Every structure is written in structure tokens, then in C-alpha cells.
Image (cartoon, rainbow, N blue to C red):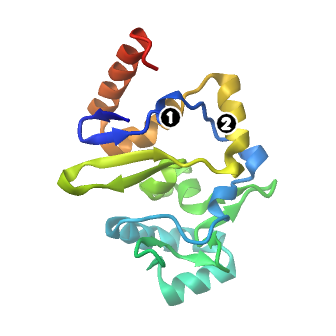
Amino acid sequence: MLQVGEVILSTDILTECFCCDLRQCRGACCVEGDAGAPVTLEEVGEMERVYPLIREELSSEACSVADTQGMAYIDRTGDLVTSIVNGRDCIFTCHDAEGCCLCASDRAFRQGRTSWDKPISCALYPIREKRFAGGLTGLNYHRWDICTPARLLGRRLQMPLYRFLRVPLVRRFGQAWYDELEQTVTELRKHRML
């Protein structure tokens, strides 16, 4: 474990190589699992704001869930998560021409149609965040077999997970925090501690 500011990170975030390979995994993290992605109340508000802009890109089942249940629900563990369709697909799921699963909200953001992209838990995946008492935040690497192509591509590119997720880490914790993380990693490597 390593602490940078008020954030405690598992060291595999620094040592594991990772780079999403959508052509191989087909965006399975948006449709696999038994609950939606963790969200905050603020993010639910953003999802409600973006929903009318992307509604036409979503399946009729997703629209039905969104219209009746809303953007999020409390899952069996008590967490607020994105609503899902048929017990698995995130309601914001859409597909590209090759059938690869994408986030309709993120796609609208990348196309400049909205100023918000997607929940931070989605952007940070496969890093999972946990809040601790005293204001500390924990970050752990969630290993899932569907991400094997991302680990293979990450190794080929020699891309550490924390560098692959630089943009969402900066979004979540700020540029100064990320710069401190980079400095810490440099020092640890210099002393052969990583």
C-alpha cells in the first residue's frame, strides 16, 4: 500500500500494465456483472440532465427502465448504482457499428454534445474507490478475467495502470495530486522499491 495525500493506493495500480482493448473485450464491463456502476447523487443529476440528449441512442428496454425506475437504484449491498437492464446492461449502453459496447453518455461527451461524460467509477475502472473514516480514500485494482486483453495490450505497450487512467485520476483527485503520485513512483523506482 502507498499513500499519496489523502488517498491510499494498492501498489498493483502502479505496477500492473493495462490498456483497454475494446476490439477484444467488446466493452464487456458495461454489460457483465450483477449490479450497475457506483454513482453519487451529483452524478445521478448529471445522468438525468444528459438522458434526453442520448435517449434515442438507447434500447427501448433501457428507456423503459430509466422512465420507470430512474437513473439509479440502491443495490443489495446498499450502494447507489446505475440502473441496469435485464439484470446486467447499464442503461446507458449503446453499440458501435462493429457491435462493441459503448457508453452513450461518454460518446455524446466525446462528440461535444454534452459537458459531462460518465460516472467517475466507470472512468476509473478497473480501479475501484472506497471511502474510509477520517476523509481517506482507498483505491484498489479490480482484477476481472474479461480484462485479460487489456492486461496483454498494456504489457505490450508497457503502460502502467495509473498512467492509462491519468485523465480520470486527474478528474477525480486533481493535477497536483497526480503530479505527486508521479513523483512518488519515480522515487520508489529510483530506490528499487517498485
Relative to 190, residue 94 above or below: below
Displayed quadrant of residue 191: top left
Which residue has dot 1 on it? 12
Q: Residues within 10 Å of mark 2 (few under 14, many from 20)?
A: many
Residue found 79% across the figure and 56% down from its top: 97
Relative to 104, residue 21 above or below: above
Residue 53: give its label. none
Which tag is nearer the camera, tag 2 or tag 1? 1
Q: Nearer the viewer, residue 166 or 156?
A: 156
Q: Is residue 74 left or right of residue 99?
A: left
Residue 38: x and y in percent read 45, 64
Badge 1 element? helix
Q: Amino acid at mark 2?
A: Arg
Q: Are marks 2 and 1 in contact (CB under 8 Å)?
A: no
Which residue has dot 2 on it? 151
Residue 93: x and y in percent read 64, 66
Residue 112 can be seen in this image: no
Residue 105: x and y in percent read 54, 61
Earlier in the chain: of badge 2 and badge 1, it is: 1
Residue found 44% across the figure and 38% down from its top: 167
Badge 2 element? helix
Q: Residues within 10 Å of mark 1 (few under 14, many from 20)?
A: some
Residue found 22% across the figure and 56% down from its top: 133
